[in-house]
Amino acid sequence: ALPICLFLLFAAAYDIKQKYKPAFKMKQPLFLLPLFITLIALTSCRQTSKKDSEYIVKIEMSLSAFGVESDNFPSIDAVIDFSKDTSICVKSYYNPAYKGSTYSLTRKEMKDILNLLEISKLQKLKPAYKVSSSDQPNSTTTIYTTKTNYVIKDYGLEGDYPLKELYKIVYKF
């Protein structure tokens, strides 16, 4: 769309210059008018194409240790908000002998996550993944974009790319 927009704008600017050629010889500042109009129109074209793009706004992840036969396996709830440049991860345990904690991701980790998701084909991810063995951790990941939301449930943490990479960064394994 942008090349077509550029072509039309330059053609219009050239047409204006040819039509009013005598005025351009006498008054040089008028020559800048088509250029100025072209720049304004280009900015409009660029803004339109940005509106059509899909951007990742936020991710919510929830790791459930329910059913896992290990007292030291945590449950983790994470919210990563790219629009506010914030993250919060809350780690808890079913066994009260283990103390929970809260942590945030670094800017580099958030950037890595965003890069990972941007190069991934989110629409190709299945809504659910499941391993055959029992007593496995379960993760629910919700990815909010400017166009749609993707909800992925992963029993066993063996989902397709980029899920395992996300788990390593967010859940810290």
Image (cartoon, rainbow, N blue to C red):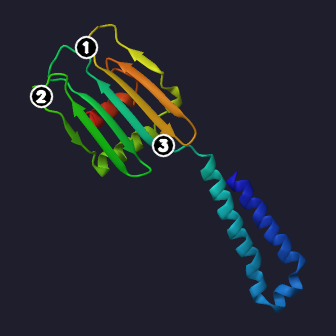
Is 43 left or right of 136, judged from the image as shown?
A: right
Residue at which label 3 appears: 56
Q: Where 8 falls versus 104 (above or below)?
A: below
Q: Residue at x 63, y 46 (%)?
A: 52
Farthest residue toward the front? 96
Q: CA distance from mark 2 to mark 3?
A: 34 Å
Q: CA distance from mark 1 to mark 3?
A: 32 Å
The disc placed on residue 67 is 1
Q: CA distance from mark 2 to mark 1?
A: 17 Å
Is any part of residue 173 visible from this angle?
Answer: no
Residue at which label 2 appears: 98
Q: Quadrant of residue 173 in the image?
A: top left
Upstream in sequence: badge 1 or badge 3: 3
Q: How packed is label 3: few (under 14 Cα within 10 Å), some, or many (20 or more)?
A: some
Q: How packed is label 1: few (under 14 Cα within 10 Å), some, or many (20 or more)?
A: few
Please provide percent x and percent y for residue 147. 58, 39
Local secondary structure at mark 1: loop
Upstream in sequence: badge 2 or badge 1: 1
Q: Residue at x 52, y 33 (%)?
A: 149
Circle 1 or circle 3, nearest the eye: 1
Three-letter amino acid code at disc 1? Gly
Q: Quadrant of residue 3 in the image?
A: bottom right
Three-letter amino acid code at disc 3? Ile
Upstream in sequence: badge 2 or badge 3: 3
Q: Residue at x 45, y 35 (%)?
A: 143
Please provide percent x and percent y for residue 44. 68, 61
Local secondary structure at mark 3: strand
Local secondary structure at mark 2: loop
Q: Quadrant of residue 29 in the image?
A: bottom right
